[in-house]
Structures are given as structure tokens and as C-alpha cells.
Amino acid sequence: MQRKEVCQEPPLLYDLTALQKEANGRHGFSADKTLSIAQSLYEKKVLSYPRTGSRYLSDDVFDEIPDRIALLEQYPAFAAHAAALKGAALNRRSVDGKRVTDHHALIITECLPGELSADERTVYDMVAARLLEAFSAPCIKEVTEIHAAVGNDTVQAKARWS
């Protein structure tokens, strides 16, 4: 038996392609549908410009992130997680101005959404959750690996705990 701790960094913020892939895998949305929803959220001023190929923010946009996190304390689905990040040192993995293309990564704006369709709520929640996740501390996991001989074969089992 072998045990070790592994540090897993949080994911980067979404660019359009990453959002489309995840929306397809989780919710069955086509790429066109995801883009259309993200565009609608942009027009409602609750999501940043959706047609981005960057998963990073510049330092000046990062300066706005504590306020965006505080805003999510008023959004019931994420209030507890947002409150837990209040005053914490934010992870800077998604901050690299040199990797920002024409537009920075997808993030929520300073406006909380009002009435949204179910699909709009789904995409908004994905972007809001990713924002909270991206700026959270790395996850420390314990990995335990067991090797056992069963007859002439060796069996391996792995378990991970966060």
C-alpha cells in the first residue's frame, strides 16, 4: 500500500470553446446553442464578451474579481462558496495578461441576472461556478494505491480523498 498527497490546481476560466465542450458534455447543448445563450447573457449585461479564445485575465480585470465574488454572495446558488472566499488570498493561476488575446476569459459582470430562461440560468451558473472555482485554493488530495496478488494476477486499486 502506498499513500501520497497530491496538489490539484483549480481549472482555468472558460473561453468559448471550453464552455461549449462542457455545456455539451453536461447538458447536451450544441456549440451553436451555447454560443447563442452566452451571447444572450452578454446582451443582458450579465456575462463578459463570449467570443473569446482566452482562458486568462489581465491584472486590471483581476482587480475586479473580489467584487464579482462578493456579488455572488447575493446569488443563492453560490452564496456560501462566495462567502467562504471573502478575504481569502485568491488563486492567480488564471491571471496572465500576456496570454489574453483580443478579449479576456468569460466571467460574470457586476450585474446580477434577473429573469433568465432555464438554459440561460444553466450557462450563467456554469460561468459563475467556474469563476469561484478558478480563484479558490488548490485542492489537496490523498491518493492511496493498493496492489494485491490474486492467484497468478496482480490487482491494483486506487482511492482519492479531498
Image: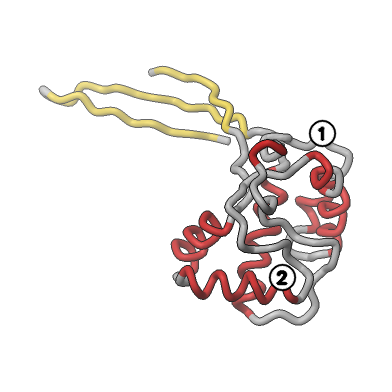
User: Dot 1: within a 10 Å radius of its alpha carbon, few (fewer than 14), some, or many (20 or more) residues?
Assistant: few
Position of residue 153 relative to residue 104, above or below, is above
Give, as a three-letter code, the residue at label 2: Tyr
Location of residue 149 by image quarter: top left
x and y percent of residue 113 in the render? Answer: 79, 73
User: Dot 2: within a 10 Å radius of its alpha carbon, few (fewer than 14), some, or many (20 or more) residues?
Assistant: some
- Say which of 21 and 3 sits in front: 21
> Which residue is rendered at x = 67% and y = 40% of the image?
94
Location of residue 47 by image quarter: bottom right
Question: Which residue of the protein is positioned furthest toward the front in this rendering?
Answer: 102
Give, as a three-letter code, the residue at label 1: Ala
Q: Does residue 25 appear left or right of residue 93 in this picture?
A: left
> Which residue is rendered at x = 65% and y = 72% of the image?
39
Position of residue 18 relative to residue 117, above or below, is above
Helix, strand, or loop for circle 2?
helix
Dot placed on the residue nearer the N-terminal end, 1 or 2: 2
x and y percent of residue 81 in the render? Answer: 76, 51
Q: How far, Cα to Cα, is label 1 from label 2?
A: 29 Å
Q: Which of the labelled discs sits on residue 42, or is there none? A: 2
> Which residue is rendered at x = 86% and y = 43% of the image?
63
x and y percent of residue 50 in the render? Answer: 64, 63
Location of mark 1 (residue): 89
Q: Does residue 101 appear left or right of residue 68 in this picture?
A: left
> Which residue is rendered at x = 44% and y = 61% of the image?
25
Helix, strand, or loop for circle 1?
loop
x and y percent of residue 71 in the render? Answer: 86, 59
Q: Does residue 131 appear left or right of residue 15 in this picture?
A: right
Picture mark count: 2
